Image: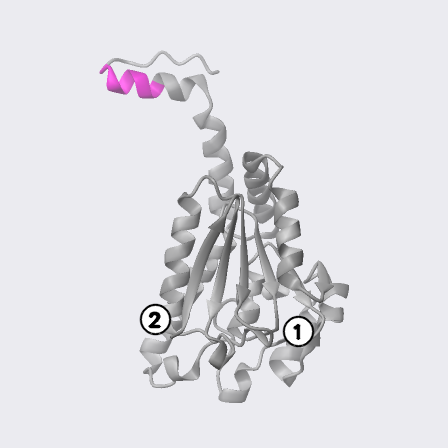
Amino acid sequence: MSAVTLHISGTTALMRLENAAKMNAFTLAMLDDLERHLIAIERESAVRSLIVTGEGEKAFCTGADINAWGGLSPAEFARHWVRDGHRIFDRLARLSKPTIAALNGHAFGGGLELAAACDVRVMTHRATLALPEARVGIVPGWSGTQRLVRLIPEPMVKEMALFGRRISAERAVATGFAIAASDNALELAREIAAEGAVLSPRATEIAKNMIHAAVGEDRDASIEALGSAAIAASADRAEGVAAFQEKRNPAFEGT
């Protein structure tokens, strides 16, 4: 039975795609699991970072299970499969905690888009990247033509999407899409998560918001989150709340 599992150990959450029989391809149930876990992780203050990986040694994720969407009507495909998946991947991209994709194997289609939604990526040497949607008559639908072109050169995205070519781990590292290639991507991801665990979680959250605002990832929400965090620490905010609760006019001092 396919699923996305979540295990929390200390300050690190590990989310694993478990559909090895189909190279960890997404089903509707797996998308639902992913969203549910992301909501839980966001609310778990003890978690400092999230690692996303796949089951087995062959594939991180090869996209969407064609049996899950092949029978949908055009309206259902666009409205539910594409838009729901996009919303869930956006939730991952905008998680307040640092995220690491440990590509234990190939990342194709939606799997590549899932990796792109994480903050950093590490890969096994044997892993490759691809956008093979055109082989079955569709196009990338979970940010493969949008978020991905902010992370790697446009010609490389076209190489995958327009010509069906695969990108090696070495090329992915050379372009900065992956920060390292290793024989054991998950172990490397755990080491990186451990390094981040000693940093200020509030500082890393703010830094992530600032970087996202700079590159256009959820720019509006990032700017408002930064402004809201600043005002929430002000004396004026405390006075405003107290005045409301005490049913009096506030006496703001601008501090």
* Residue 115 spot, x, y in % from top left: 57, 64
Query: Which quarter of the picture shows residue 175?
Result: bottom right
Classed neighbour count for the residue bearing mark 1: other residues with Cα under 10 Å, few (<14), some (14–19), many (≥20): many
Task: Please name whichever residue, 69 or 23, is drawn nearer the observer in this view of the structure.
Answer: 23
Q: Which residues are magenta?
A: 240-247
Residue type of the residue flagged with mark 2: His
Task: Please name whichever residue, 208 or 201, is drawn nearer the observer in this view of the structure.
Answer: 201
Residue 173 lies, with reference to residue 47, above or below; the image says below
Task: Please name whichever residue, 200 or 213, is drawn nearer the observer in this view of the structure.
Answer: 200
Residue pictured at 38% horizontal, 63% vertical: 33
Identify the disc placed on residue 127: 1
Identify the disc placed on residue 80: 2
- The answer to whether residue 225 is left or right of residue 147 is left
* Residue 160 spot, x, y in % from top left: 64, 78
Residue type of the residue flagged with mark 1: Ala
Residue pictured at 46% horizontal, 27% vertical: 231
- Does residue 103 show up magenta in the picture? no
Res 145 seen here: no
Task: Please name whichever residue, 253 or 27, is drawn nearer the observer in this view of the structure.
Answer: 27
Residue 114 lies, with reference to residue 214, above or below; the image says below
Query: Which quarter of the picture shows residue 69?
Result: bottom left
> What kind of secondary structure does the magenta stretch mostly adopt?
helix
Residue 242 lies, with reference to residue 18, above or below; the image says above
